[in-house]
Amino acid sequence: MHNNLLKFSLNIALSIGILAIFSGCGSKYYFEPKDEEILGEISYDGTFAPRIGISSVVRNGATLTNGQFITENSEIPKVYLSYGSKYLNQTEQYYLIQNKKTLVLIDKENLQETEIELESIPVSAAMDGNLIAIIFDTNTIAVYDTRSAQIIYRQDNAPATANNTLIAAPYFLTDIIVVPTLDGKLIVIDKQTMQLIRNIVVNGDKYFNNVIFLEAIANRMVAATPKRVISVSPSIINTFDANVKEILFFEDRIFIFSSEGEVILTDRDLNEIRRVKFPFAHFSAVNHGQNIVVLETEGYLITLDEDLQKSAIYTLPSAIDEPTFSGTNKIFIGNKFLNIK
């Protein structure tokens, strides 16, 4: 009798546990502002081509389904990439394109293509003069010299088995090259000697831990993975842990947009100043003009002042179920765009 009662109790507990799991999976909350919180409706400012959308996004650009691409300056050049190619970055002279294991440099003036055959697939790249810093899908990083047509620096890193698709590009400063990795590190290389200066760990998580943001202003460098933001100065490294969706970095302040629908304002040392929460909001894209602009996936546009003291909510024509890319003064949603003033 005792054994039967014990089995019965265990079965009941197991059933309740399973029911709770499935009930939790079926409960999904959405951002639903009250009617009185919505100040009006925002229409898209235009489209750039019918039946064309965004097929892939990197930090500095997006590739369209027809082979064109959007640069970080919100330009769509009259250049059509071959099937399967992806836009990575640009310089004043070249567009940097990935085509399988080949890095293609397209001259902006005459559209002449230079192909650089590589060992693996480049997933991010940046170019300065004759030097190209490259991140491979294997998490190996390298610096390629176009003058000698060879790799002059290479570092193998532990493979990163899963990554956020928003991969930050390498960064060239006056005398150093900073290369983000797919496993949450910044590799700092001396540009003259091609020697490793420093290895900065942004975050050590194993999965979805690539560096998704990297930018330097004056003597301050800010980087982020999906779990942590760091601010690097000549004297100290500050950190801020959050579930990071996006970052905006100005010289004296940093805005962190979290997966929980929070907008967090910090100073450049990552000391928190203020935060605002939009319950159950899922941010799709951010930008800034006179105000901070945030797109929410249920079809809302949120604006905030730079002190996070005031906010306003507007409706968009529809929910956002397409990839987005935020460039200079524009946010692209599929083949539509919003002008940011």
Image (spheres, grey):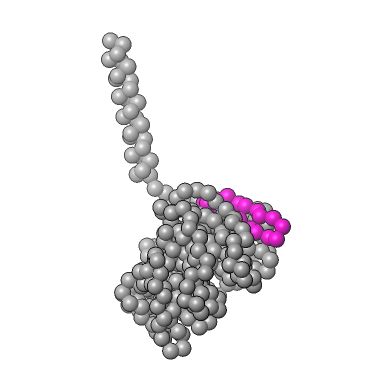
Residue displayed at 52% across by 66% down: 153
Q: Is residue 235 left or right of residue 84?
A: right
Q: Is residue 303 left or right of residue 139?
A: right
Q: Evaluate whether residue 50 shows in this view.
A: yes
In which quadrant of the rendered view does residue 139 lie? Answer: bottom left
Residue displayed at 45% across by 84% down: 107
In which quadrant of the rendered image does the C terminus lie?
Answer: bottom right
In the depicted view, which residue is nearer to us: 306 or 36?
Answer: 306
Give how far across and how far down residue 209 sits, in percent.
48, 53
Query: Which residue is most to the right?
Result: 235
In the depicted view, which residue is nearer to us: 66 or 185?
Answer: 185
Residue displayed at 33% across by 34% down: 19
In the depicted view, which residue is nearer to us: 297 or 187?
Answer: 187
In which quadrant of the rendered image does the N terminus lie?
Answer: top left
**Residue range of the region highlighted in magenta in the rendering:** 227-247
Give how far across and how far down residue 147 sits, in percent.
51, 79
Give how far across and how far down residue 206 sits, in percent.
47, 48
In the depicted view, which residue is nearer to us: 70 or 174?
Answer: 174
Give how far across and how far down residue 337 sits, in percent.
44, 74
| Magenta stretch, main secondary structure class | strand
Indicate yes or no whether the magenta region holds residue 240: yes
Indicate yes or no whether the magenta region holds residue 93: no
Q: Is residue 68 above or below residue 168?
A: below
Q: Evaluate whether residue 301 shows in this view.
A: no
